[in-house]
Amino acid sequence: MLLASIPSPEQGIWYLGPVPLRAYALCIVAGVVVALWLGERRWAGRGGQPGVVYDVAVWAIPFGLVGARLYHVVTTPDLYFGDDGSLVSALYVWQGGLGIWGAVALGALGAWIGCRRAGVRLPVFADAVAPGIVLAQAIGRWGNWFNQELFGRPTDLAWGLEIDLENRPVEFAEFATFHPTFLYESLWNVGVAVAVIWIDRRRRLGHGRAFALYVALYTLGRVWIEDLRIDEALQVGPFRLNVWTSLAVLVLALGYLAVSARLRPGREESVWLPGREPAPEEPTDSDSDSDSDEPGQPRDVPTGRAGGSRESVTRRETDETAAGSPPPPER
């Protein structure tokens, strides 16, 4: 008999009148908000202009969502192209099923387009938003908890996750609790975000290395977490496709870290693409007037008479004397 376990939510949908509010979607939105907030702060810390992160996100987020869904559909074809599958259900994103690798691939394409339009360097932008991305993943994983999906093998550990009978795979119907892989990955991702921020502050990572560090640390955790899962997925040899993908991406990220640190040490001096730097602000008229006065030189002081300044009056008196006017009497 289990003494403790993690219960699953009784529902994941609430209604605001006729409008459904789905917990899965709310978790994704909350993750995006946190990613934008943190990315904007880190971007400003790199010398970037406010608002650029939001401008690039307009391109990156839609591309990423489409890529994430495409990756899920392609890697689980039986759900959509099999005998009992439905291709139309591929559009039901709210039911779950987003692949991180598709999100990274197409999201990077969208970010590249956004960065080119904004005139900023993609590697600098990627380094700034990397911790926010992995925090968004950590928050988004809680959507799987509400949907009772993507859990791991059966377990009798105290933190086993309770899954309703209708959501258990047929071959595991007799088990009541399973590994909460959503929680494992969420906690791991929070740790990755903290590690990237800390190492970046100490090492001043540049040229995309903070992003590569995020990818390496994330894939390291994804390998063992993915191996625990029992949901339907494409199997390649002894491992699921996502395990092989994680291992391949891990090797690529580590290779980039090593080569980049050797070829391009340090950080970029500017966030801007060559020739796209903002033009310097022109001085205003008031600034020009104040700059034209030399320090220590008093301005002309009006005398209150029609003759103008004291200096002008003195000059006129001198001219009159030179023209033959009698000098003032001596006292």
Image (cartoon, rainbow, N blue to C red):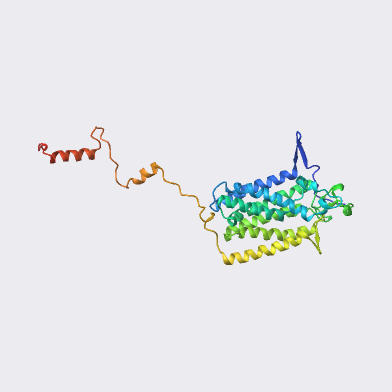
Which residue is located at x 89 percent, y 54 percent? 171
Determine the residue positioned at 74% across, 48% down. Answer: 142
Residue 71 location, quadrant: bottom right
> Relative to the observer, which residue lies in front, 162 or 167?
167
Instruction: Find residue 119 and report its horizontal and vertical position in percent.
Output: 55, 52
Question: Which of these two is toward me, 123 or 31?
Answer: 123
Residue 225, quarter of picture: bottom right
Q: Can you give x and y, in whole percent of width and height, for residue 179 in the image?
A: 80, 54
Q: Which image quarter is the C terminus in?
A: top left
Rendering coords of residue 280 (x, y %): 46, 49
Give the residue displayed 34% in from the left and 46% down from the top.
292
| Residue at 63% across, 54% down | 130
207 up-or-down from 54: above or below: below
Instruction: Classify residue 75 as left or right of residue 63.
Output: right
Q: How many numbered callouts? A: 0
Location of residue 220 in the rendering, given as x and y in whole percent from the top left corner? 71, 61
Observer-nearest residue: 315 or 120? Answer: 120
